[in-house]
Amino acid sequence: MKQVILAAHFPGVNNHTVWSDPASGSQIDFASFVHLARTAERGRFDFFFLADGQRLREQRGRIHDLDVVGRPDALTVLAALAAVTDRLGLAATINATFNEPYEIARKLATLDHLSGGRAGWNIVTSSDAFTGENFRRGGFLDHSQRYERAEEFLRTTRELWDSWVPEDLVADPVAGTFAAADAGAFTHHGAQFDIGGHFTVPRSPQRYPLTLQAGDSEEGREFAASTADAVFSRHSTLEAGQAFYRDVKSRLAGHGRSPDSLKILPGVTFALGDTDAEARENADHIRRQQVSPQTAILLLEQLWNRDLSSYDPDGPLPDIDPDVSEDSIIKGRARMHRDPLKTAAEWRALAEAKRLGIRDLIIEVTGRQSFIGSPARIAEEINEFVQADAADGFILVPHLTPTGLDGFVDRVVPLLQERGVFRTDYETTTLRGHLGLENDL
Amino acid sequence: MSAASLHLAVALDGAGWHPAAWRDPAAFPKDLFTAAYWAALVAEAERGLLDFVTIEDSLALQSTRHEGPDGRTDQVRGRFDALLVASRIAPLTGRIGLVPTVTTTHTEPFHIASGLATLDYVSGGRAGWRAQVSGRGAEAAHFGRRDIPGLRPESLDDPETVRLIHELFDEAADVVEVVRRLWDSWEDDAVIRDVPTGRFVDRDRLHYIDFEGSRFSVKGPSIVPRPPQGQPPVTALAHARVPYEFAARGADVVYVTPHDAEQARAIVEEVRGIGNDVLKIFADLVVYVGEDARERKARLDELDGAGHVSDAAIFTGTPGELADLILDWRRAGLEGFRLRPAVLPTDLGAITRRLVPELQRRGAFRSGYEAATLRGHLGLPRPAGRYAGSRR
Ligand SMILES: Cc1cc2nc3c(=O)[nH]c(=O)nc-3n(C[C@H](O)[C@H](O)[C@H](O)COP(=O)(O)O)c2cc1C
């Protein structure tokens, strides 16, 4: 039987994070990060995961103010978490556009040393000029070049990580040799980076920190198949998951890789209850908190691509059609709807048939929880998805900070362990080891 | 002389500041690349009630040559990212300030602001920053974005070198300005969690910084809420007029390198003359502390094949003699000292277990932490955000 991989996503910047609940704590105090990380480690999770965004989102030219805003620098907070955890992997999302390989390679190698081999990197490709306005270089990179830079960025960091071999660090005071003469020497001449010199961090425990990829286009999938250790995907239903899984795994052979060398990890949410009925009730309650009246209008605007602030959240959908011009009213987040006119027609038909106002419709059509039910049902479904090759495991996105994982760890993890599909204790010390990728290097 | 007003910091680097320190019998050369090594050093510094530790860094290998690597195998080469080391140590300590070195030349100001604000969160208000320009060509070649011909100490008067120094420090001043604006870009009470209106933040309390400089522009706001200290203290090492000006305009603490009390007086006068009354002036000192200080230095010099040279004055002597020197130089107007232990952990232990008690005996140093934040230790008030109250 396949073993389930589990990761914990610190809930962050999106409307899934319920900040209005009285149980919701700080999204920024270190204590919140410690709580979630220690809970994940108590549950023997593979890793802790942080998303990224380098500019506050805007809608209609104003900072989006309805969702959680603000997050710490990922690598810095993970270095601190390395001090309060022992085995849990620590993975940061870092974009390849507004960073430089030398600096990121150095930071990831440092984190890998400081955590004893637990560093992970979700390499993303955000390249919008909007985010670029926060950086020295401005927009600077065309959308079409995102993956070219990301691919060369990752290749370059691996060259830097290989610039010290283990024997280079001697530290023998009697012989008087600290390090080999050419330790850290590298040159890289490429289209994106033309650099050379010496790297300052000796070979780290994992040699290459675990690499995740998150991006769904043809180029994104090829990038993952050619080089990543895991994919953070958004295909979380059984059928969509299986289709994605087949597609990405079938690409591996073309890159000379075995199917097991790349793990597919959809991001999923969940709602627990003592019984399935209670869980459904909890799920509905969570959905209503996630979609406030104000959020309902904002989410509707994202499809209509127009100002709908004068509409009643409990009233009917607009008669006017979505604006399909290129100008997007949202900045800092991808437009999610490929064919807005068709989607609007579907939403209108659904609202009509079920007699739904705007808010209830939005609740119906956006972001369902992936797993809803009693602990037994959720454990069963997670295992079923993994055994049926819809995933190799999941990145869980709890809806509450920082206690959102407590119930899962206390009640679902033991059931997975009983089935023999999830570890009862850590068997290795490194993140690669947890995922069974150690020997692939 | 109030006990609390003398400030003491230590500068941590590798196995200590003597190039052969790693070969001292008391050193731990095999542990330099472990978290435990750094944790033990900082715990020892905190035991001595020091204001803060700085952690050295650079984006190139250590070298005896200014232009680039020297290929030497008999000295410590390689180091960690200082910000991450500081962050790794933060949860293991409770009071001491943590001041990593981060360059202003090659890193993005936006990332610097986020990283240091995060260090301030994970340490509960104990973060600081040693802002450092990178003038070495080797560092620039690691980034490939610009050519820096490299500053040679022997050609500091060349017009080309003078121009480059001005350029690097002007740019550093812009970076510090951007970082400070980003720290202020969230008002302290920007997170409102107002359920009736559905608003998590009050967007009127978030501010675009709209920095437009000659080298770069940054829009803002930060992605990290305003850090606990509001603004973590900014520190800089300075040896000459241009960096003095940079420090006086941008920093909260400047480290200077006098070689005697008289020079200290002259430097303090020059720095004060630039006009920043609240800037704290610390002297850097390399220290070998103990009855055997001279012999230890001589032994290490012999191992290294050269006498230890440094930009800062080198002290060898007993804890009592060091206390004398500190109190003597202090009369020149210095507020504190950043001691650079020649050998770790030997000279650090001598500072915390012998120098500090000696200073305490003389009523010149605190006998317990009186504050919980680095600003608190330094007697710096928490600043109001510059945008507070302004509305877009
Ligand atoms: C599940 C998932 C999570 C992502 N998380 C982030 C993130 O935290 N930060 C970010 O900048 N981009 C993130 N991305 C964006 C991707 O890196 C990429 O820029 C985007 O999906 C467009 O690439 P594509 O056309 O290949 O899908 C994420 C994408 C996916 C699918």
Image (tube, rainbow, N blue to C red):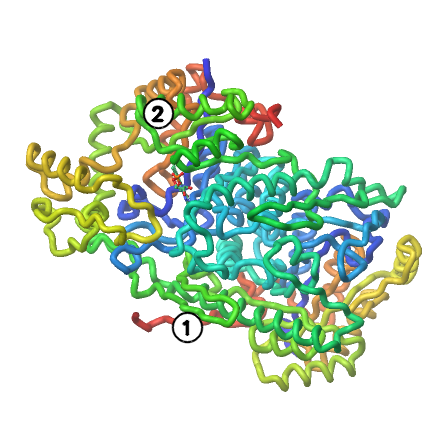
What's the amino acid at mark 1? Arg
Chain where mark 1 sits: B
Counting from the top left corner in percent of width and height, residue A400 is at 33, 41
Q: Name the residue at the front extreme.
A: A191
Counting from the top left corner in percent of width and height, residue A297 is at 18, 49
User: In the picture provided, is B389 more to the left or to the right than B362?
Assistant: left
Label 1 SS: loop
Kindly identify which numbered label has been placed on residue B177: none
Q: Quadrant of the N terminus of chain B?
A: bottom right
Say if residue B232 shows up in the picture.
Answer: yes
Q: Which residue is at 49% across, 66% downward? A: B216
Residue situated in front as seen by the camera: A384 or B39: A384
Q: Quadrant of the C terminus of chain B?
A: bottom left
The residue wearing badge 1 is B386
The residue wearing badge 2 is A241
Q: Quadrant of residue B273?
A: bottom right
Q: Name the residue at the top extreme.
A: A1
